[in-house]
Image (spheres, grey):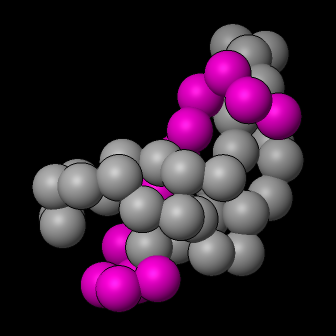
Amino acid sequence: MQAYCLKCRTKREMRNAQATVLKNGRPATKGECPVCGTKMYRIGKG
């Protein structure tokens, strides 16, 4: 799954993607950038 990396400022394929639920109940996917290692979130896709 692709997400936007704020540090690299580009869309990248997420590494170690895991489905999660935010505090407000919305589904999200979290992972990390394969280039810089920054945490990435994609809201709305579970």
Q: Quadrant of residue 16?
A: bottom right
Q: Which residues are magenta?
A: 34-46
Of residues 17 and 10, the one drawn nearer to the viewer in this rendering? 10
On the picture, is 39 further left or further right than 8?
Answer: right
Q: How many marks?
A: 0
Per the picture, the main secondary structure of the magenta-coloured stretch is loop
On the picture, is 36 further left or further right than 40?
Answer: left
- Res 41 visible: yes
Q: Quadrant of residue 8?
A: bottom left
Q: Measured from the top left, where is residue 38 in percent x and y? A: 37, 73
Q: Measured from the top left, where is residue 32 in percent x and y? A: 52, 71
Which residue is located at x 35 percent, y 86 percent?
35
Membership of 37 in magenta stretch = yes
Asked if residue 29 is positioned above or below residue 44 in the image, the reply reads: below
Asked if residue 46 is positioned above or below residue 39 in the image, the reply reads: above
On the picture, is 28 further left or further right than 34?
Answer: right
Q: Measured from the top left, where is residue 11 in percent x and y? A: 35, 52
Which residue is located at x 53 percent, y 64 percent?
13
Of residues 24 and 6, the one drawn nearer to the viewer in this rendering? 6
Which residue is located at x 82 percent, y 34 percent?
46
Which residue is located at x 79 percent, y 15 percent?
25
On the picture, is 31 further left or further right than 4?
Answer: right
Q: Measured from the top left, where is residue 23 in percent x and y? A: 69, 24
Q: Quadrant of residue 36?
A: bottom left
- Res 39 visible: no
Asked if residue 3 is positioned above or below residue 38 in the image, the reply reads: above
